Amino acid sequence: MGSVLAQVRNVLVDMDGVLYRGLTALPGAAEFIAFLQERGLGYLLVTNNSTLTPEQFSTRLARMGMSVDPEHIYPSSVATANYLAAHAPRGTRVFVVGEQALVDALQARGFVMGGRESQYVVAGWDKTLTYDKLVTATLAIRDGATFIGTNPDKTYPLEHDIVPGAGSIQAAITAATDVEPLVIGKPGTPALLGALELLGAAQKDTAILGDRLDTDILGGARAGIHTIMVLTGISTEAEALASDTPPELIYADLPALLTDWRRILLA
Ligand SMILES: [Mg+2]
């Protein structure tokens, strides 16, 4: 168990199900963040959620007792903007099906919000989705625009309900165009590889810490980094052990991970 943690110098930390559930911090979350900071480990909080800006996530974390600068928060909106910036010049027109945080991230990298004439269609979770937006996205893609998805999550769990997420909106556009999106967020690799680049981190000494086999752990395996799972979110230990891509390490929760990590560092 120990050899992986002894190698890890950088951590990509999933948020929902790892640091908090809903608006409540999970046990050990603030202590874990402080551990990363005190130890000088490289870290980014990575999330598929494209509807909040890094500043808004930072504020939300602060209310739960976690002190994290916006620069250490890497939502799929920012990952998408960074991916596009590596593939298209500033001034390129983009049609966005998504929320203001996604528009902000794209505009910050010099992209211009366009309509049917756009070279890219970027689709994320959009709680003000309209038929008109689906029409414009469809026509732009039929005219040759590249179709990008911020993250593939088909649903999003609210406190009492499960509602359509970004993947469901992308599926509607795919149904109308027969074009599948290039997906940036987990288990797509562009977001994770972009995070490594931002940290200046090598794959061999970087780990992803997450709660979901189908996003965090699969994405981490595809990106060639170490994988650590905690059992405070979606996936169970039985599912992890039966998986084709099981995590390298499994911990009940953050306090168990911290105990092990501290022990290894002292050894
Ligand atoms: Mg999660």
Image (spheres, rainbow, N blue to C red):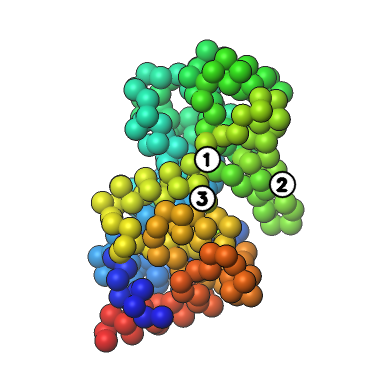
Q: Is mark 1 within 8 Å of ligand 1?
A: no
In this view, the mark in front (2 or 1):
1
Q: How far across and down, in percent of the image, does residue 196 sit? A: 33, 51
Secondary structure at numbered mark 3 = loop
Secondary structure at numbered mark 2 = strand
Residue under pointer 3: 186
Q: Is residue 128 left or right of residue 183?
A: right
Asked whether the viewer can see residue 26, the reply is: no
Q: Is mark 2 within 8 Å of ligand 1?
A: no
Sequence-earlier tag: 2 or 3: 2
Q: Which mark is residue 21?
A: none
In this view, the mark in front (2 or 3):
3
| Kind of residue sitting beneath label 2 | Val
Q: Is residue 130 left or right of residue 50?
A: right
Crowd rating for badge 3 (residues with CA inside 10 Å; few <14, some 14–19, many 20+): many
| Kind of residue sitting beneath label 3 | Lys
Up/down of 154 relative to 19, above or below: above
| Residues under numbered marks 2 and 1 in contact, where contact means CB atoms less than 8 Å apart | no
Q: How far across and down, in percent of the image, does residue 144 sit? A: 54, 18
| Kind of residue sitting beneath label 1 | Val
Residue at left offset 46%, top offset 74%: 249
Distance from disc 2 to disc 3, alpha carbons, whole Å, reads 19 Å
Figure label count: 3
Up/down of 5 relative to 110, above or below: below
Q: Is residue 133 left or right of residue 84?
A: right
Sequence-earlier tag: 2 or 1: 2
Crowd rating for badge 1 (residues with CA inside 10 Å; few <14, some 14–19, many 20+): many
Residue under pointer 1: 183
Distance from disc 3 to disc 1, alpha carbons, whole Å, reads 8 Å
Residue under pointer 2: 163
